[in-house]
Image (cartoon, rainbow, N blue to C red):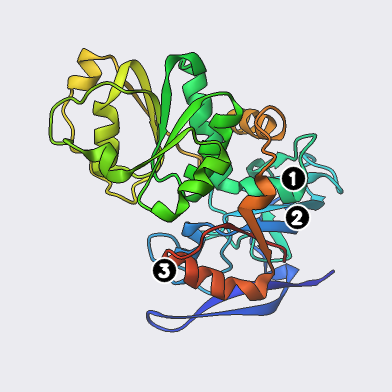
Amino acid sequence: MTTFRALQVTMPQPKQFVRQVVERSIDDLPAGELLVQVAYSSLNFKDALSATGNPGVTRNFPHTPGIDAAGTVVECSDGRFAAGDEVIVTSYDLGMETDGGFAEMIRVPSSWAVKLPSGMSLKQSMMFGTAGLTAGLSVQELVEAGVTPDQGEILVTGATGGVGSLAVAILAKAGFQVTAATGKESEHAYLKELGATSVISRDEVTENSTRPMLKPRWAGVVDCVGGEMLAAAIKATRYDGVVTCCGLVGSPDLPINVFPFILRGVRLIGIDSAECPMPRRQTVWNKLASEWSLPQLETMNDEIGLEGLEEAISAMLAGSLKRRQIIKP
């Protein structure tokens, strides 16, 4: 194969962006030791921003989005992988300024790739994708900090989002009592299907949130929202509880005092999947393939081709996309 299909975003005029599926040459791919034939990718909000020219994600065009990719190694010039190995590539600069997974082929540094864990298919890896990795890292932090299922409720905010929904399912699989917070009343039954013990509104989390402290309730928190929601969750976390945060859709600001930290010993841990060290990344992927594998994973995803991305990207930006989108280039 010397050419391949890819979704390409061009900028024919300033602030005008055009998306179309094109034929590209492998020779045009960026430098890197690892050439991978992509079997699956997945659609993330960052991809939708890249595809519409958001300068906070991508500044150089033409460009192929896709921060996730899973496929088979075609060649690896530094010997880290062998031809035929199945790998997962997420995070770092993939799909941002480096051409990403919305294509049949990618070329990247070999240090960006994780060998596909035993017991997981390439398609399943992209059903998790960066969202699943982030959710898994959040749960791993709770576990390593000593939070156990017998200590009480774990709150997940933004629970219908990609990270939130997978966090609900992983926590339930790990035996935790999960309370899912969402502003979408129509999704309560879906969250219960994922394993949530109870579902509450966002307003219930933020009620009386201007107070310095709230009645202790949560043994742990996976926050995907930030802002007032995160502050309220911290204020209602029990003594020695642990809060992880990975999102800022609510706000990047944290309106809070130090009382929960110095009076209850609450610990706040930031989650970053982009530059996460490879050993930790591999640990979480191995858990997602084994003890955290999800029987309901298939029902959380729809499969589309490159031609289906235009509609899916528009739906994601409009907030009307209900299921994760798996792309088969």
Q: Residue at x 85, y 69 (%)?
A: 1
Marks counted in the figure total 3
Q: Residue at x 63, y 44 (%)?
A: 112
Q: Which residue is mark 2?
A: 36
Position above or below: 106 against 12 = above
In the image, is 290 to the left or to the right of 102? Answer: right
Q: Which residue is mark 3?
A: 318
Q: Nearer the viewer, mark 2 or mark 3?
A: 3
Q: Which residue is mark 1?
A: 87
Identify which amino acid the numbered label 3 is placed on: Ala
Identify which amino acid the numbered label 2 is placed on: Val
Residue 180 locus on image (x, y percent): 43, 38
Front residue (pair 71, 73)? 71
In the image, is 254 to the left or to the right of 10? Answer: left
The Cα–Cα distance between marks 3 and 1, rounded to whole angstroms, is: 32 Å
Mark 2 Cα within 10 Å, few/some/many (few <14, many 20+)?
many
Q: Quadrant of residue 214?
A: top left
Position above or below: 266 against 122 = above
Q: Residue at x 42, y 19 (%)?
A: 152
The mark nearer the N terminus, 2 or 1, is: 2
In the image, is 132 to the left or to the right of 105? Answer: left
* Secondary structure beneath label 1: strand
Front residue (pair 283, 149)? 149
The mark nearer the N terminus, 3 or 1, is: 1
Identify which amino acid the numbered label 1 is placed on: Val
Farthest bottom residue in view: 13
Mark 3 Cα within 10 Å, few/some/many (few <14, many 20+)?
few
